Image (cartoon, rainbow, N blue to C red):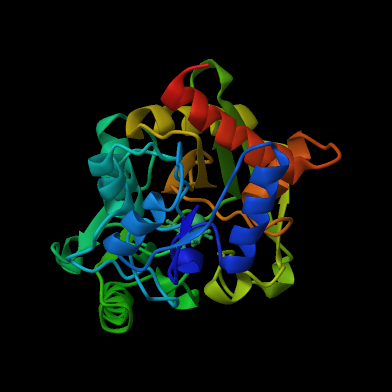
Amino acid sequence: MVTGQGGDAQGWGNMAVTGSVRDAIVANGYDCRIVLAEDRRALEAGLRDGACDMVWSSLYFFSNREDIIGIPADAVWVADVLDELHVPYIGPSAATMKALIGKFDTHEVLACNRVSCPRHVLCPPSDCGEVDFFPAFVKPNGESRSVGISENSVAETPEALRKQVAFIQRELGQAALVEEYLPGREYTVMVIGNGKQREILPGRVTVDPSHYGKYPILRSDLRGVGLTHVSLPDAHKEEAIALAGAACDALGCEDHVRIDMREGADGKLRIMEVNGIPGLKPVKSWSPQIYALYHPGEDPYGALIGTIVRCAMERSYGK
Ligand SMILES: Nc1ncnc2c1ncn2[C@@H]1O[C@H](COP(=O)(O)OP(=O)(O)O)[C@@H](O)[C@H]1O
Ligand SMILES: [Mg+2]
């Protein structure tokens, strides 16, 4: 397993989570060691430290930022390094990882493949004057955990939009993705495994409505504090499964991703983002919660981790 200071902002979680994943891997009968890698050299040294059939990284790229993802222009991508070294890894390919971490790029691939996503404009390079749909939703293009998302993310007017785009640029140093506002129910769909063994497991995400302000959105202050609840969906189930499957096929997702979607004003689902390295906090993260809903057993977390590793091994080495 590879992790570093950016593990929580970018990937499955902090060192404690990494320890939980490692314990579950070992309980599934595999050997496992943790490599702390702040740069390429540390990763290469860690790989030389012992045998390695498969890498699982919580990092998209090397970073010492704990607060935000904040992709720098000169990012060194873990999957690129692993490709160069011919070491197989869990999760999507380097190209797909890069398309997933930038939400605009994800939407462009989805739109090209006629997979439903919101109308979207990236500012810059586009000017917010080009946005002709209101209310609009303004979010950082490359963040997670609702970083940068508040009541101000919903812009009802061009002035409010311009202000929020400037806020994202100033505070998070990145372009703002402006989307059509999706007013309806929210879902998150776990996709695990590949080919015929792929399982697509939709969950409904709710928060007690008393926590909402004017808009029923997952603001940053509602995330990671035990307020979100995941349950089996009572509507949109087949639609969510079909949409998630089409998105994974279009983007080339592998092993484990989690896809966030919401209902538009027309009642149809649209994809907000595809998480390439979903959170794996035991009990708390959405993927372990969803897996436990569909696979209630003695140790759903162990079964989830074991399934991801087994699927990646089969994909890379055959049965
Ligand atoms: N277009 C949108 N319309 C309405 N709400 C949105 C929209 N995009 C995002 N949100 C809200 O913001 C939250 C975070 O957005 P998301 O794109 O999933 O980014 P991340 O989880 O990576 O921070 C979502 O869970 C949802 O509640
Ligand atoms: Mg999300």
Q: Quadrant of residue 229?
A: bottom right
State the image coordinates of residue 288 (x, y, percent, origin top left).
68, 48
Report the front residue among 44 and 129: 44
Q: Quadrant of residue 281?
A: bottom right
Q: Quadrant of residue 161?
A: bottom left
State the image coordinates of residue 289 (x, y, percent, origin top left).
71, 49
Please tell me which residue is depicted at 28% across the width and 62% down the height of the picture.
Answer: 41
Please tell me which residue is depicted at 32% across the width and 47% down the height of the picture.
Answer: 79
Please tell me which residue is depicted at 38% across the width and 42% down the height of the picture.
Answer: 117
Extreme-right residue of the structure = 298
Q: Is residue 315 above or below residue 212?
A: above
In the rendered structure, the answer to whether residue 304 lies left or right of residue 257 reads right
Q: Note whether residue 69 is visible.
A: yes
In the rendered picture of this protein, how many numbered marks are placed on residues? Answer: 0
Report the front residue among 62 and 102: 62
Q: Is residue 116 above or below residue 47?
A: above
In the rendered structure, the answer to whether residue 19 lies left or right of residue 315 reads right
State the image coordinates of residue 182 (x, y, percent, origin top left).
47, 53
Q: Is residue 36 above or below residue 245?
A: below
Please tell me which residue is depicted at 68% across the width and 36% down the height of the picture.
Answer: 29
Q: Note whether residue 236 is visible.
A: no
In the rendered structure, the answer to whether residue 109 lies left or right of residue 92 reads left
State the image coordinates of residue 301 (x, y, percent, origin top left).
72, 45
